[in-house]
Amino acid sequence: MSAPMKVGAVIITMGNRPDELRALLDSVAKQDGDHVEVVVVGNGAPVPDVPEGVRTVELPENLGIPGGRNVGIEAFGPGGSDMDVLLFLDDDGLLPNTDTAELCRQAFTADPELGIISFRIADPDTGVTQRRHVPRLRASDPMHSSRVTTFLGGANAVRSKVIGEVGPLPGEFFYAHEETDLAWRALDAGWMIDYRADMVLHHPTTAPSRHAVYHRMVARNRVWLARRNLPAPLVPVYLGVWMLLTLLRRPSGAALKAWFGGFKEGWTTPCGPRRPMKWRTVWRLTRLGRPPVI
């Protein structure tokens, strides 16, 4: 029998939620099975007190969400190779169940093509899962597990072989859409992604627009995502659909100004290397229920 998969957890923090971070670390420590190694990355901030055995890295500046997580990955060896599976968890989240890490081990062991698992995020007080936290178009039933085409950044598990094969998160994105960029590259390499309703992260209900840079980053990174990953004929289709959807949502004047500013920035600034996905990957995304035009 092969040895159980080694699991590590990457948590980034701005140092402003010490109580929530401690509760999350306690929930990771209570996981069934072999010990889950943990690294906490202070993203331009000191790391609060953590239990003995938890690794810490303090960065002199905020590298953004993907940049901070990439540093955490490297703390487990090149590309996270010291671990078989890496959990990425928001520092104000909590694992309410003790079997999550073990369920990840079982899922990755049973399915060699499975590269990424997206957890279900639920409000700790109401148990409600927001529609936006179900990574598929048909999101009315969050209790239904399925294959998907992207995943949730602060509540997921990634096979380290995926990172070794397709590379880390796009650090230049700083915030927004970095998960989809990695997901598309993983799918293009032949890996699959599952949304698992039975793997839960408790996280208070929040609006993504709470981040001051939300509208600009979402628009800029949407353009970068398309420029980096889509076949050329699909780039204007994808971005045209998202522009229409943004206008239909009728954002405020200030939000719309920020969005269009970010959209322009996405075209006029470097987006990183361009590696358009294969057309068979486009078809795979379509069969999974989300063609890469929406």
Image (spheres, grey):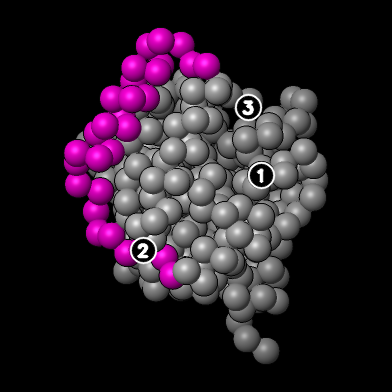
Give the residue pinned by disc 2: 276
- Please tell me whether mark 1 sits on a helix, a strand or a loop: loop
Residue 109: image quadrant is bottom right
Of marks 3 and 2, which one's residue comes earlier in the chain? 3
> What residue is rendered at 25% in x and 40% in y?
267
In the displayed structure image, the side of residue 8 where residue 236 appears, left or right:
left
x%, y% of residue 44? 27, 35
x%, y% of residue 234? 43, 53
- Determine the CA span between mark 2 and mark 1: 23 Å
x%, y% of residue 196? 71, 54
Magenta span has 264? yes
- Determine the CA span between mark 3 and mark 2: 36 Å
x%, y% of residue 152? 56, 46
> What residue is rendered at 63% in x and 27% in y?
204
75 w.r.t. 206: above or below: below
In magenta, the rendered stretch is 250-278
> What residue is rendered at 75% in x and 54% in y?
145
Magenta span has 133? no
- Please tell me whether mark 2 sits on a helix, a strand or a loop: loop
Q: Amino acid at mark 2?
A: Pro
Mark number displayed over residue 204: 3
> What residue is rendered at 19% in x and 41% in y?
269
Of marks 3 and 1, which one's residue comes earlier in the chain? 1
Mark 3 packing: few (<14 Cα in 10 Å), some, or many (20+)?
Answer: some
Q: In the current view of this chain or complex, which residue is farthest to the top?
A: 253
Of marks 2 and 1, which one's residue comes earlier in the chain? 1
108 w.r.t. 69: above or below: below
